[in-house]
Amino acid sequence: MNFKLVFRCLSYRNYRLFFFGQVISLIGTWMQSIAVGWLVYRLTNSALLLGVAGFASQIPTFVFSPFAGVIADRHNKHRLLVITQSLAMLQAVVLTILVLTNHIVIWQIIALGSLLGIVNCFDIPIRQSFIIEMIEKKEDLGNAIALNSSMFNIAKLLGPAFAGIIIAIAGEGVCFLLNAVSYIAVIVSLLAMKITYVEKNIPDKRMLSEIKDGLKYVMGFAPIKYIIFLLAMTSLVGVPYQVLMPVFARDVFHGDSRTLGFLVAMSGVGALTGAIYLAGRKKVIGLENLIMLNTASFGLAIIAVSFCRNLWLAMFFILAAGFSMMVQMASSNTILQTVVDDDKRGRVMSFYTMAFMGTMPFGSLFAGTLATKIGAPATLLIGGVCCVIGALLFSGKLPVLREKIRLVYLKKGIIPAIPTSI
């Protein structure tokens, strides 16, 4: 593999600052995520409340993301990111104080999770649509998105492993403290960037009207519509397997917080491998095939996990699930950002965020509720089967999607026009 090709976007100063600042911050974010799940389960012994906590932290994304997309299209994304990252740091500080002073109760965890969810529902689509402003060559967009995914999964690999060890030694509160400190890195990196901001002519429209225009654009273009639908389905029934990992760690594999950390870290190893694989690709052609194939393989992997009673075998299939989920998500992101009109980028990425992150709370709540009735393994089995069915339905749309995507690539000069002879 040509590693110079894989890491080519790090040659851009702004993107390089963003990349390394985010890696540090996201390690802290994953530490907090694992610690919150373990804290909730330790305090309540309830899979249902695990689902409720996940629902509360993710539901704001479903409700507010379209508004975030309009704001991203109207205003300076760089300044907005400084604000959202600062607010997320404040949430971590409050959580740290409550836990370290032994005043934490379940309703506070849920409330603070909801507040962070509101911040994230603005941060994520703004951050996704900001990527293109940090690179100079549009043909490097796919590499930037793949590296962005790799940064997320480097953190997903390291953060849970650190969290499992720290929880066992010092408790959840130290994880929250380290997360609060980690935000300093990304805020400093954002402030160090040199961004040339072009003032935008803000449309004389109400926000709801712009959201409606964005939704009409998404529903009117088949590649965007079907990719977003498939992402929403996968996030609703497949991705919530992560919410049930504390149940698998303690009740299925009879482990502790370190077992949970290793399980989630293996998902990160798989996802990081998938991101590096995509970063090494030179072209965006054929990504729609990868979306279909990896949705199916993701479903098959979590089906396999549902039958596992051996920890090492389960870790292998969780690695496979992480790889497939990352390739599907990052390939979808790349196609969407490549084919979308620039003036609608923020809104399309908000619907992407709504599909990928906004449906998770419903999936988390459903998974937690169903797991209390039929058990965590059976819940994973149902989710995996649904993902395989979704991939089969998407495969039927591939001929239409390929043609429409090809026409956009020709128009934007991403692929050369083939001369025809008379």
Image: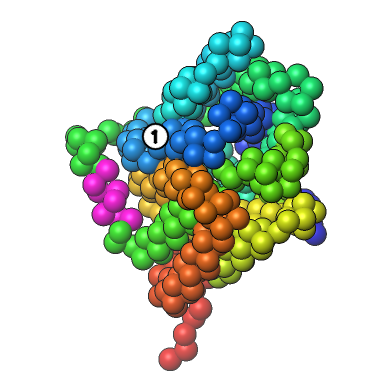
Spot the residue most to the top: 101
Point out residue 169 in the picture as x, y percentages from the top left corner: 79, 22
Point out residue 25 in the picture as x, y percentages from the top left corner: 64, 28
Point out residue 181 in the picture as x, y percentages from the top left corner: 66, 17
Q: What residue is drawn where x is 65% and y is 53%?
A: 322
Residues 247 and 25: in front is: 247
Point out residue 365 in the picture as x, y percentages from the top left corner: 45, 43
Q: Specify the principal SS of the magenta part.
A: helix
Q: Is residue 253 left or right of residue 341?
A: right
Q: Secondary structure at mark 1?
A: helix
Q: What residue is drawn where x is 41% and y is 45%?
A: 362
**Residue 215 among magenta residues:** yes
Residue 53 appearing in the image: yes
Q: What residue is drawn where x is 47% and y is 89%?
A: 421
The N terminus - image quarter: bottom right
- Given the image, on which type of amino acid does mark 1 rest? Pro
- Position of 78 relative to 302 (above/below): above
Give residue 422's quadrant in the image. Answer: bottom left
Query: Pointer 1: residues within 10 angstroms few (<14), some, or many (20+)?
Result: many
Residues 127 and 368: in front is: 368
Residues 280 and 373: in front is: 373
Residues 300 and 203: in front is: 300
**Residue 155 among magenta residues:** no
Q: Which residues lie in the magenta part?
A: 211-218
Q: What residue is drawn where x is 80% and y is 54%?
A: 312
Question: Which residue position is annotated with label 1?
Answer: 60
